[in-house]
């Protein structure tokens, strides 16, 4: 889960979700493939790659059972990788009934080993593991490798190895350390690959998945995030009827798309509450109001609470105290505004599919617990939830936002911490003066990053203002000014991140502008720490 949670978002209700086996609402005519998660680090990515092929996929814990899988009427089943050895007594096992559902099954890595072991193949722990890039040699194309090169790179991550395919199976490929790196039995509808097709390091992986989905499962590959807009609009209308709905709007991607989708469905039955706590980036509050109230004509209550939050933060420098104060104060402001809308029955929550998965924790818990963002609302607030994004990953939410006409600047807005700039004023009190200075520095950074065409290449780019002053010389005079830290990272999911190699001339331009335009800044430095060992945010 990303470390950077929105505070004032649509996902603010602290409410229990449905049982983890509850099907995700998707268009009724869409084909689905179920991915069973055996604990692999790439399990979510498998589901995302299947969706990118145009087939809806749902990731379920490995223990849900064949009956639960069958209830979804999938066109196919994929068994994910996992960290365990198939011979470990506590390792996840394969339920044989899954192979008797009458649908094709594809095992990836650990999933392939489970299939081999269950169906009579030979799996053994190898003396040498196979981790990272490997070379795949295809000896039989079969269904999975039709038309693909017979020599191709792939990505491996395993020690147990399939040495013999099960009886009746055809070995399709080998690799550097794997005698049987892929096999199939078209008659049984069972397929296995030892490598990971879902990662970018396997260049033909998407084609392999496509062959399984189209040629083996017979999927109609027409699903897209944008294609569910009209379906979700129908569902929202059916759920809400003529009742009033409230939404906490932050201006972040999730809450913005959720709010716009609900408004498209029910119009002025929706009221959005936007709380400006004074910790946002430069002009963001005005942008949110202009976009939703003026452009999309969404009923919007905008609360200017900057002074209220600053009063609560006076004298506070410890980051966790800042977070708790901001979270608690936001709850109070939102409750006050919600009370003025006494006839509201529903609360829009921007729950994403990754939230649903991660709230389950991958521990086999029978119920997905509530996904709490910083400042989640109390349990006793009595709203029924509307969750129009619950089936979507983050990149799919952006696609829906674009389909709804949300401005590019909002669709591609980088993640932003809920407490905002307050936790980027490091080691000191988040005063009005410091927040304004940091806001101006960040505006310079974002302006230059956008001019360079790099904004969408970066996971996050922002400034940090430590409570440190340094000596400088400006205009032949000694200065004693603040240090601004530039932090820019690349990442796919915020679980790991690398510092971005920004061009030197760009860094020079950013530093020059900050020092020349911001009177209280006389030094600019660059953070080149990756995650791990560091974190993306400083606090």
Image (tube, rainbow, N blue to C red):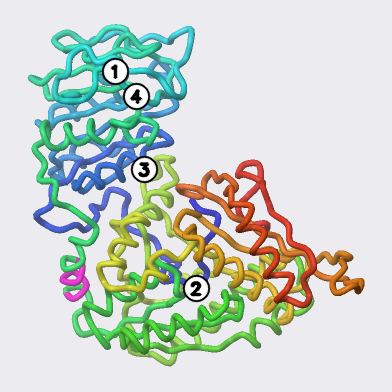
Res 247 quadrant in image? bottom left
* 3D distance between C-alphas at marks 4 and 2: 41 Å
* Element type at mark 4: loop
Question: Which badge, 3 or 1, comes first in the chain's sequence?
Answer: 3
Q: Say which residue appears at 46% left-offset and 54% top-offset.
A: 457
Mark 3–mark 1 CB contact (< 8 Å): no
* Element type at mark 2: loop
Highlighted range, magenta: 232-237
* Element type at mark 1: strand
Q: Which residue is mark 1?
A: 151
Question: Which badge, 4 or 3, comes first in the chain's sequence?
Answer: 3
* 3D distance between C-alphas at marks 1 and 2: 51 Å
Residue 201, percent from left and from top:
39, 32
Res 264 quadrant in image? bottom left
Q: Is residue 267 left or right of residue 27?
A: right
Q: Which residue is mark 2?
A: 8
Question: Which badge, 4 or 2, comes first in the chain's sequence?
Answer: 2
Q: Say which residue appears at 32% left-offset and 8% top-offset.
A: 179
Q: Which residue is mark 3?
A: 44
* 3D distance between C-alphas at marks 4 and 1: 14 Å
Question: Which badge, 1 or 2, comes first in the chain's sequence?
Answer: 2
Q: Say which residue appears at 32% left-offset and 19% top-offset.
A: 113
Residue 173 belongs to magenta span: no
* 3D distance between C-alphas at marks 3 and 2: 26 Å
Q: Say which residue appears at 36% left-offset and 41% top-offset.
A: 45
What is the total number of numbered labels drawn onto the structure image? 4
């Amino acid at each position: 889960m990303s470390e950077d949670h929105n505070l004032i978002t649509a996902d603010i209700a602290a409410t229990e979700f449905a049982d983890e086996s509850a099907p995700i609402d998707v268009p009724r005519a869409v084909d689905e493939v179920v991915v069973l998660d055996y604990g692999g680090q790439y399990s979510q990515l498998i589901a995302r790659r299947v969706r990118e092929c145009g087939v809806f996929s749902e990731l379920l814990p490995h223990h849900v059972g064949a009956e639960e899988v069958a209830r979804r009427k999938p066109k196919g089943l994929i068994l994910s990788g996992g960290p365990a050895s198939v011979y470990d007594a506590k390792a996840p096992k394969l339920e044989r009934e899954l192979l008797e559902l009458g649908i094709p099954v594809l095992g990836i890595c650990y999933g392939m080993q489970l299939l081999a072991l269950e169906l009579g193949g030979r799996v053994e722990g190898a003396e040498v593991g196979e981790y990272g890039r490997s070379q795949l040699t295809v000896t039989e194309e079969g269904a999975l490798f039709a038309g693909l090169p017979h020599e191709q790179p792939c990505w491996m991550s395993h020690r147990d190895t399939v040495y013999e395919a099960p009886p009746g199976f055809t070995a399709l490929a080998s690799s550097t350390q794997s005698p049987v790196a892929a096999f199939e039995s078209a008659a049984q509808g069972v397929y296995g690959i030892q490598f990971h097709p879902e990662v970018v390091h396997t260049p033909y992986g998407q084609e392999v998945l496509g062959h399984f989905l189209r040629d083996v499962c017979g999927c109609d590959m027409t699903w897209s995030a944008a294609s569910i807009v009209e379906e979700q609009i129908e569902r929202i209308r059916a759920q809400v009827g003529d009742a009033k709905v409230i939404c906490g709007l932050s201006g972040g991607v999730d809450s913005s798309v959720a709010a716009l989708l609900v408004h498209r469905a029910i119009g002025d039955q929706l009221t959005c509450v936007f709380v400006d706590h004074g910790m946002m980036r430069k002009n963001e509050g005005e942008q949110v109001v202009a976009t939703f109230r003026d452009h999309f004509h969404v009923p919007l209550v905008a609360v200017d609470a900057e002074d209220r939050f600053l009063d609560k933060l006076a004298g506070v420098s410890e980051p966790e105290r800042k977070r708790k104060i901001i979270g608690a104060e936001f709850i109070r402001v939102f409750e006050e505004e919600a009370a003025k809308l006494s006839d509201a029955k529903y609360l829009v929550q921007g729950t994403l599919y990754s939230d649903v998965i991660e709230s389950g924790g991958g521990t086999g818990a029978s119920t997905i617990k509530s996904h709490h963002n910083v400042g989640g609302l109390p349990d006793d607030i009595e709203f029924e939830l509307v969750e129009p994004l619950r089936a979507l990953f983050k990149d799919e939410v952006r696609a829906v936002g674009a389909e709804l006409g949300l401005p590019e600047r909002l669709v591609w807005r980088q993640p932003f911490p809920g407490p905002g700039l307050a936790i980027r004023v490091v080691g000191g009190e988040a005063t009005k003066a410091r927040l304004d200075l940091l806001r101006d520095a960040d505006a310079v950074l974002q302006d230059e990053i956008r001019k360079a065409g790099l904004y969408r290449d970066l996971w996050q780019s922002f400034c940090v203002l430590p409570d440190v002053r340094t000596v400088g010389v400006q205009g032949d005079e000694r200065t004693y000014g603040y240090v601004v830290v530039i932090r820019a990272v690349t990442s796919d999911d915020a679980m790991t991140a690398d510092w971005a190699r920004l061009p030197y001339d760009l860094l020079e331009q950013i530093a020059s502008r900050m020092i020349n335009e911001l009177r209280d800044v006389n030094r600019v430095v660059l953070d080149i720490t990756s995650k791990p060992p560091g974190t993306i945010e400083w606090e």
